[in-house]
Image (cartoon, rainbow, N blue to C red):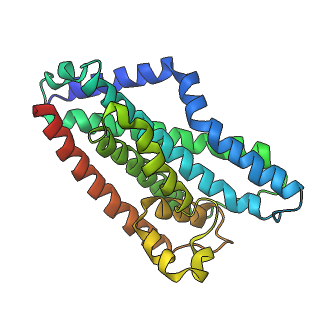
Amino acid sequence: MNWKTFFAMLARDAHVARRNTMVIVLQTFLQPLMFVFIFGRVMVRSGYMPPAYKSLLLPGIMAISMVFTGVWAVAMPLIAEFQFTREIEDRLLAPMEISWVAIEKVIAGTVQAVISGLVVIPAAWLILRPGVDLSLRSPLSFAAITVLVALFAACGGLALGCSVNQQHIGLMFSMVLTPMIFFGCTYYPWSALNSFPILQKVVLINPLVYASEGLRAVLVPQFPHLSIIAVLVGLLIFDALLLVAGLRQFRNKAVS
């Protein structure tokens, strides 16, 4: 393993991300912040939502931003490099095993997802204040869940980026990411589905449920949420599954 080459690739991706900061910011935060403004400010101030909904909403918005950022940061460059620019061929010639090229992209996407999630907290707080009641009682649990959520997003981006054709990008968002968001407990806690017991069990196959519930557990523990143990186990399982699937798809695409 040539670590110098690996870190050089990471540095290059960091440089590209810095150069496209404005585009990344607009792609990442525009939709979540619109949801925050409409549901957390307009609906609450109009009396259609209780004031406590502001605090309930924030962890879900953070989860959405991290997932969008991680998936976009990994999937879109892979789709372009494999099918359009063919830039991936230069990376595959680097003096290291093929899988590490994919792992480098996952790490870069994870870092971007973590940053996007952390930035959402003060940005949303400014929009929703006053009335947001956050309580970070366990910084270590918050750090662990944040990293696992970001890793899930990046691994998901790897799996999707190596499986979706360029002409099916729109389908990826409409058929995969949109249902994941609406059934991912982002705008409501998992316990809100008690009246729909079958659906409540089915949504547990959605990794975003564990992301939203985990962030809810560490940021607003006064609301109902899944146990942190269940969240950590769920995220670890999905991270491992998506990473294995993504690496397999990457190798198959790289050697084809």
Image point (70%, 42%), residue name: 34
Image point (61%, 37%), residue name: 29
Q: Is residue 79 left or right of residue 200?
A: left
Residue 129 in sight here: no
Q: Is residue 196 left or right of residue 8?
A: right
Where does the N terminus fall, quadrant-wise?
top left
The image quadrant that residue 50 belongs to is bottom right
Where residue 172 sits in the image (x, y, percent)?
41, 43
Q: Is residue 34 above or below residue 254?
A: below
Where residue 16 sits in the image (x, y, percent)?
42, 20
Image point (89%, 61%), residue name: 47
Where residue 10 sits in the image (x, y, percent)?
33, 27
Q: Is residue 250 above or below residue 79?
A: below
Q: Nearer the viewer, residue 112 or 42?
A: 42
Residue 185 in sight here: yes
Q: Is residue 165 left or right of residue 234?
A: left
The image quadrant that residue 109 belongs to is top left
